[in-house]
Amino acid sequence: MTDVISIKSLLLRHADVRIAAGRIAEIAPALPRRLGEETIDCRGGALLPGLADRHLHLHALAAHQHSIRCGPPAVRDPAGLRAALAAAIPDEHGWIRGTGYHETVAGDLDAAALDRIHPHRPVRIQHRSGALWILNTAAASALVGGDHPGIERHADGTPTGRLWRADDWLCTRLPRTRPPGLADIGHELARLGITAVTDATPDLAPGSLAAITADMETGALPQRVHLLGAPLGASLDGSSPCRPTVGPYKIVLADSGLSTFDDLTERIRAAHADGRAVAVHAVTREALVLLLVALWEAGSRPGDRIEHAAIVPRELIGDIAALGLRVVPQPGFLADRGDDYARDVSVDDQPDLYRCRSLTDAGIPLALSSDAPYGPLAPWIVIAAAVHRTTPLGGVLTPEETLTPAAALDAYLGPLENPGGPPRRVRSGEPADLVLLHAGRATALVACHVALAR
């Protein structure tokens, strides 16, 4: 972008906006064009602050681009999975990486079942939840030894080929590769209007942290980046927008094995003692209860947040508000797999799925996010899901939890470091990370269509 640029734009009113040195310099009904200025005619399109996705996984998103789709809608049965793997082009080490698997395709896959589908080349397939990897025998045999609590085993102690929450362990035993480049991801995020992201990957390896920083410094990843997975004690120079900043400390309450109360309480205390809030992955009712009890014991800190909050019983909303917590949910999952929820989630839990309005009504700060690549990345899909709560087949889940279009958009506009805080506005002196829509704000919000940033 040039140092000086004039934009004829529609904010909440028709106005001209002048940008200089990366900041909004002037806003007025009409600004005279200066010599050498570039002028962009917005043609009635709305000019908004850049959107912020408060929960995604950058390197997983990049790897997803080069992975085989192993679940709906691309693959729906064993024959489809067999065909997809047979047609797959392996990486430089001969491995096939699949993503998006769900049990509706071919049941609870393990090594033996995957061998019957594709035994010839090493294959690893990630469950769509992101919590589970399934390896065939060729892949498992190629791994260097070692143990991990997430290795699922048969009754006789032999591995099943299923690895729960063992991403770091698995990566250290795969053929050595560099983290994937993020240039394509940076371009796609910008196309969707996202100018800032929170990477929610827990326990980031030093190589991953260095790779994200390098891609920001070169401009391959132009977005501002906030990290939940930076280790305790990490000190990153976040004074430059070309370097990541440290956010709350990510703690995962895994569905496959909850932490003990004492362990969780101590981890929360350790993060708080390090000067950081916590961002706790809590999907199930049990995980949320454990987290809230632990926070009552350890004490909460401003900035503490709940990631996902997929199930929030109404009787716990008061505790969340009293503890001063923020919630970062992904209602886009309703648009992506809402029919599965209607079929598989118990009737008692369905009213508690991905609450939105009841949380904001209780004064709880709410920031929408994608959880990409596990959920849909496009913020306009997530916004539409929060407004309509419509499933792929047209059903509606808990319509009483819908947000107004304006509230859903605002849930993407809070400051990156203050999710759920007051939405940013286009004002003089603010950073010029802006999004230009193809339509006016009212039209875009009423239709909740995919309004791509120019």
Image (cartoon, helix red, strand yellow):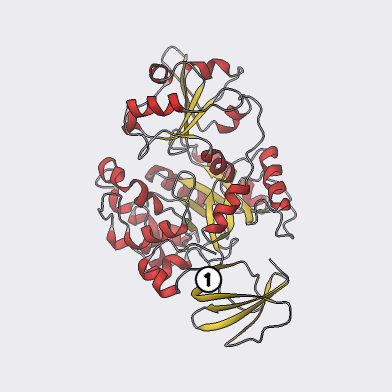
- In the rendered image, the quadrant that contains the C terminus is bottom right
**Frontmost residue, 275 versus 439:** 439
Q: Residue at x 26, y 46 (%)?
A: 342
Q: Which of the 4 image quarters holds residue 286?
A: top left
**Frontmost residue, 87 versus 408:** 87
Q: Residue at x 47, y 64 (%)?
A: 411
| Secondary structure found at label 1 | loop
Apparent side of residue 208 relative to residue 374 in the rendered image (left or right):
right
Q: Say whether residue 105 is visible.
A: yes
- In the rendered image, the quadrant that contains the N terminus is bottom right
- Residue 162, position in %: x, y? 46, 24
- Residue 217, position in %: x, y? 73, 52
The vertical placement of 312 against 25, above or below, is above
Q: For mark 1, what is the residue?
A: 422
Q: Say whether residue 107 is visible.
A: no
The vertical placement of 196 against 125, above or below, is below
Residue furthest top in the image = 156
Amino acid type for the residue under numbered disc 1: Pro
The vertical placement of 305 against 422, above or below, is above
